[in-house]
Image (tube, rainbow, N blue to C red):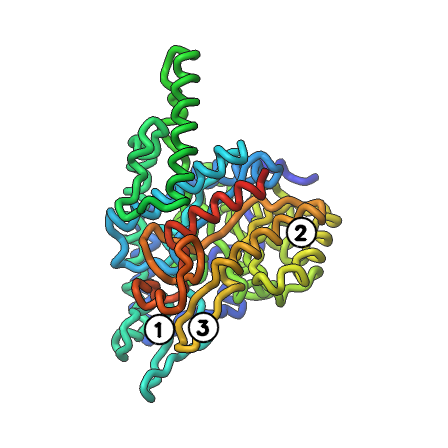
């Protein structure tokens, strides 16, 4: 008899280190095994960053989203840096995500689940293991949890102590986010808390302000009618996520919960597997199949329909709603050739998945000077096409996965300010991939809201 879904047994053929018998891609190569062991032993003794109760609450909310009762807004930096672990940077990311979520709620009349690419997004996969500059070849920068971005031999040497620094920065970030979300920062009675000081009088900001004024009028009306303040408007849930790429780190922060219901990765609420590491017989899939977190897996043009079905069955064998999010990332010019068959195959199989669209990674290109960028028009086109294909396939797009920042950067072309290649050099800050700036992110929020309606 199948065990009750709300009390699953621990996998008898899985353990947090069983992935080590599989091929692990995109992993750092350390030159001091004793230092690695020492760092991992320290990590294993540190308290968890999130709780199993929070993780379970997110899984229930994701099940609601998959059923069409909510929408997932997932966004943040392509790769967090330790230097950005400061109050201003964290606050700006939260502000833009809260503003975007408010647009989606007001325009679509649907709940929004806010998930940040934050408090742990310190590792990045790379297409090449080394980088050459001026005839000098060094290991690639793999994120602050592995090595440093400076181009020296010492900078690029993988350092196991950085895993401890990543834990510390993640803990500080999560602590600040909790304090803000529980302490009134997200109170709908005080939307002035979310203002960004550099935002000018743009068409997007005017449209947002009109929406905010209308919402404030509605809140005042409801409180007059009810005779009391609407307490549920004073706080929001805010969850964290990161790509679970660095498996030694992920293993060290994996714990059984107090109810002995299984293993949880307690460094984040929602970890995901990248498109480059989703091999069904690989180490990442082996690790992810055993943790109780809701998980995501990114898929690109190389995935076949039967391969995706096999992956779904391995990662969600009990077909549990809210357990698995499929994040597709094809590119505006390839989504129509790949997504329809995948969506139709999964629908006919009866598998419970939440579909989310990552319109960023498939639309990355380089300028003639070698600068990585993305076109705002390509990003919006992929979003619109994704909504259409899911409608036609009888499936539902229930989430969006964006690389964005609350900073006034110039990294993606086009958008409300019509940024050109010349503008990229004005304020390009990302060390890895280009991100949407505030104006571009808000424009996309209004676009998604229209598609949701």
Residue picked out by circle 3:
366
Marks 2/1: CA distance? 44 Å
Residue at 53% in and 52% down:
296
Element type where label 1 sits in the image: loop
Mark 1: give few (<14), some (14-19) or many (20+) Cα within 10 Å: some
Q: Earlier in the sequence, mark 1 or mark 3?
A: 1
Is residue 247 something one can see in this rendering?
A: no
The numbered disc on residue 67 is none
- Give the CA separation, mark 1 to mark 3: 31 Å
Dot 3 lies on which element? strand
User: Would residue 390 appear left or right of 30 to someone viewing this image?
Assistant: right
| Number of the front mark, 2 or 1 | 2
Say if residue 367 shows up in the picture. Answer: yes
Which residue position is annotated with label 2?
A: 389
Instruction: Identify whether 85 is placed above or below 95.
Output: below
Q: In terms of sequence position, does the residue under pointer 2 or pointer 1 come before the other?
A: 1
The image position of residue 161, as x and y in percent, is: 28, 64
- Quarter occupied by the N terminus: top right
Q: Is residue 411 left or right of residue 350?
A: left
Residue 63 rendering spot, x and y as whole percentages: 57, 38
Residue 448 higher or lower than 302, as above or below: above
Q: Is residue 54 above or below residue 367?
A: above
| Residue matched to label 1 | 30
- Horizontal side of 300 relative to 343 (left or right) equals left
């Amino acid at each position: 008899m199948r065990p009750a879904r709300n009390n699953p047994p621990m996998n008898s053929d899985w353990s947090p280190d069983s992935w080590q018998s599989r091929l692990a891609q995109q992993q750092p190569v350390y030159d001091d095994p004793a230092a690695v062991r020492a760092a991992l032993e320290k990590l294993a003794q540190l308290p968890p960053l999130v709780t199993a109760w929070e993780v379970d609450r997110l899984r229930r909310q994701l099940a609601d989203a998959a059923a069409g009762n909510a929408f997932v807004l997932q966004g943040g930096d392509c790769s967090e840096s330790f230097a950005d672990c400061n109050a201003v940077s964290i606050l700006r990311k939260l502000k833009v995500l809260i503003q975007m979520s408010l647009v989606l709620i007001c325009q679509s009349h649907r709940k929004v689940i806010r998930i940040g690419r934050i408090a742990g997004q310190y590792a990045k996969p790379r297409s090449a293991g080394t980088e050459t500059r001026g005839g000098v070849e060094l290991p690639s920068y793999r994120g602050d949890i592995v090595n440093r971005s400076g181009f020296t031999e010492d900078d690029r040497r993988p350092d196991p102590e950085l895993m401890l620094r990543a834990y510390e920065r993640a803990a500080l970030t999560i602590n600040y986010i909790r304090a803000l979300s529980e302490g009134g920062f997200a109170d709908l009675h005080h939307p002035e808390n979310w203002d960004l000081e550099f935002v000018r009088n743009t068409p997007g900001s005017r449209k947002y302000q009109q929406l905010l004024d209308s919402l404030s009028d509605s809140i005042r009306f409801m409180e007059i009618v009810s005779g009391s303040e609407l307490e549920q408007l004073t706080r929001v849930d805010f969850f964290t996520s990161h790509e679970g790429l660095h498996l030694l780190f992920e293993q060290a922060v994996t714990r059984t919960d107090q109810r002995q219901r299984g293993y949880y990765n307690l460094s984040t609420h929602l970890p995901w597997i990248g498109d480059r590491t989703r091999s069904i017989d690989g180490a990442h899939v082996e690790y992810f199949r055993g943790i109780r977190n809701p998980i995501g897996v990114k898929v690109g043009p190389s995935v076949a329909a039967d391969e995706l079905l096999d992956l779904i069955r391995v990662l969600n064998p009990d077909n549990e709603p809210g357990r698995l999010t499929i994040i597709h990332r094809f590119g505006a010019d390839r989504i129509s050739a790949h997504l329809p068959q995948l969506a139709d195959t999964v629908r006919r199989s009866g598998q419970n998945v939440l579909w989310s669209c990552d319109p960023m990674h498939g639309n990355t290109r380089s300028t003639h000077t070698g600068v990585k960028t993305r076109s705002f028009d390509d990003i919006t086109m992929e979003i619109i096409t994704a909504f259409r294909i899911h409608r036609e396939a009888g499936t539902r797009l229930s989430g969006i996965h964006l690389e964005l920042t609350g900073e006034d950067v110039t990294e993606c072309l086009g958008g409300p300010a019509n940024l050109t290649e010349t503008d990229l050099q004005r304020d390009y800050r990302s060390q890895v991939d280009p991100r949407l700036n505030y104006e571009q992110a808000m424009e996309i929020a209004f676009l998604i809201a229209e598609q949701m309606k």
